[in-house]
Amino acid sequence: QLQLVESGGGLVQPGGSLRLSCAASGSTVVSLPFYAVAWFRQAPGKEREGISCSSSGGRTNYADSVDGRFTISRDNAKNTVYLQMNSLKPEDTAVYYCAVGYYTDSLKCQFLRREYEYWGQGTQVTVSS
C-alpha cells in the first residue's frame, strides 16, 4: 500500500512563500515515475479542489487560481513531489493534500478526485498577517 506524507505547511504572511513536500513510500508495486501526482486543497466550508497536477510524462496543469504562482515538481529518485507556492494570498489558506493516480495516457492528469487512488493526510497552510 502506497503511503503519502505531506510536510512543509505552516503560517506565512501574504506575499510569502512555502514549499510543500509529499514523500511516497511503502509500495513495491506503485512506482511514482509511472503515476500522475496532484495537489488538492480544501478550505473550511468548501469542497476539496484540485490545484496542480503532473502527469507521468511530465505535463503539468494548474488551476486558474494558482497559475503563475505555484509550481509542481517531482524528484522520482527520492519518491517525492513538491509544490512551490509563491505570492501567497489569504485565500490560499487551506489543508493541502497530495494524491497519486494512474493514467494510461502519460501526458494526462486532471483534477478529478475519483481518479486518484492514494492520498496523504494533509498539511495546513495559513496565510495571514
Image (spheres, rainbow, N blue to C red):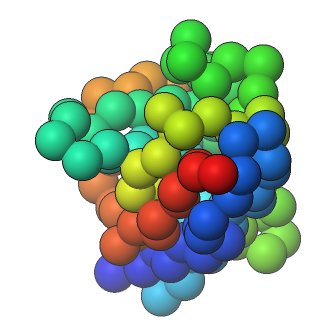
Residue 114 picture quarter: top left
Q: Is residue 4 left or right of residue 34?
A: left
What's the residue at 35%, 62% (across, down)? 119
Residue 89 picture quarter: top right
What's the residue at 78%, 19% (across, down)? 68
Residue 127 image point, x, y percent:
58, 50
Count of number-bearing discs: 0
Q: Is residue 105 left or right of residue 115?
A: right
**Relative to residue 85, is residue 123 depicted above or below?**
below
Residue 20 in view, yes or no: yes
Residue 1 image point, x, y percent:
34, 81
Residue 54 image point, x, y percent:
64, 36
What's the residue at 76%, 58% (across, down)? 19
Q: Residue furthest bottom?
A: 26
Residue 100 image point, x, y percent:
45, 53
Foreground of the two, 92 or 66: 92
Q: Is residue 86 left or right of residue 125?
A: right
Foreground of the two, 91 or 24: 91
